[in-house]
Amino acid sequence: MPTVPPPRPDGVPALAHRAGVASGLLGMLCVLAVLCFRLPDWLVTRDALPLYLQHLDLLRGLLMFSILATLGLAALSLLLWRRPQRHALAGLVLGGVALLLGGAEAEPVGTATPRRFAAGLDYFVLELLVLGLVFIPLEAVFALRRQPLFRRGWQTDLKHFFVSHAGVQLLSFASMIPAQALFAWAVQWPFQQAVAAQPVWLQLLQMIVLVDLATYWVHRAFHHVPWLWRFHAVHHSSEHMDWLAGSRMHPVDVLVTRAAAFVPVFVLGFAPAALYAYLVFVSFHAVFIHANLRWRFGPLRWWLSTPEFHHWHHASDAEGLDKNFAAFLPLWDRLFGTAHLPGHWPRRYGTTGAPLPEGYVGQLAYPFRRPQP
Ligand SMILES: [Zn+2]
Ligand SMILES: [Zn+2]
């Protein structure tokens, strides 16, 4: 028989709270999505615009459905508690604002000239929606640990998620500069043409192997060089693992890791199709390995990075410290002596020293502060 979760400490029934928070979050995404329809030149990833134009009806339908779901969840929350619940009220207001801005019928305002840089709000909204729809039900059914969906620190992680997605174009642009500045001498056109002429699956495989090798060593440096560790400690400060926890990353960490990852891509000159396939695959996989999932994958776990493999990287248990650096191929950890898969799960996660700030701004500033004695 299904059990009804107990009321929260603030007296709000758990279901009313969940419906309210979901309504508030979805309402926020709806307003952002309508803004994307109204100001595409400013807010939408330029490369994705032609794709969106091809599927405009589908996107408008999705937006209408989301606005209705926002209002429905808010109503449900208010019905369950019969008192104003702040998240549900926010959901009602945001759903109303999305409708007032034009809802699913919103058209672009003016015709500005395309800009060199645009925010990736579309990327933020769609990724959060898709990842949430995939991972929230998976974690509910196959949870490794029982923990609330809106566990401590989720708002901080969402802010990290927002910055890395909405700022995707700027981050990608900046992370290409070091390779272009330092490795232009290594680029050989005939060699690049031969690389790009290979089948896409083979290029994908080569990219995974080489990028993983490059980022393995950068990741190790982030752990062993004290001033670098202060940036990377932000990623390790999560004490709960789930699909959102992996987005907790200092922008400097993101930038340096992506810059290193781009070096082999730049020098070898993989075809754009292989690069896009790699990016889609890696962005999904990076979320997957942090997820609160108890799947073990048998002997495959020694060959591909799984939640178990990466959870050990986040462990604060002594046996798991500075282990499992590879993002995708445990092979590198096995070769370089840092693999750790003991057959049981870690007991706890997080950093072992003084705790890091819990807020977003505090985490951004943390590496620049004087270390506590
Ligand atoms: Zn690490
Ligand atoms: Zn991680």
Image (cartoon, helix red, strand yellow):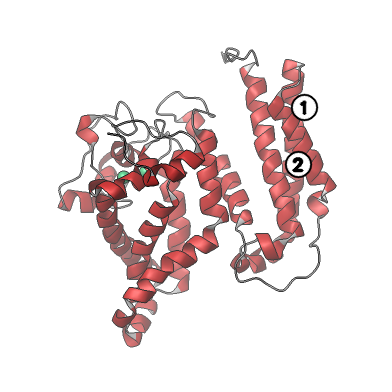
In percent of width and height, residue 223 lies at: 26, 46
Query: Callout 1, which amino acid?
Result: Ala
The residue identified by callout 2 is 67
Q: Quadrant of residue 16?
A: top right
Q: Which mark is residue 17?
A: none
Horizontal and vertical percent for residue 221? 25, 52
Question: Tag 1 or tag 2, which sits nearer the N-term?
Answer: 2
- For the C terminus, which image quadrant? top left
Total marks shown come to 2
How far across and how far down the image is residue 199, in percent?
A: 39, 73
Q: Residue at x 68, y 34 (%)?
A: 24
Q: Residue at x 64, y 12 (%)?
A: 11
Whether residue 134 is visible: no
Q: Residue furthest bottom?
A: 190
Which quarter holds ligand 2? Answer: top left
Asked which quadrant contains residue 105, the reply is: bottom right
Mark 1: which secondary structure?
A: helix
Q: Is residue 333 left or right of residue 274?
A: left
The reply, left or right, for residue 14 in relation to residue 267 is: right
Quick one: label 2, few (<14), some, or many (20+) residues within 10 Å? many
In the figure, 199 relative to 144: above or below? below
Name the amino acid type tagged 2: Ile
Residue at label 1? 75
Residue 228 in the image: above or below residue 81 = below
Q: At 34% from the left edge and 31% from the top edge, which residue is drawn? A: 349
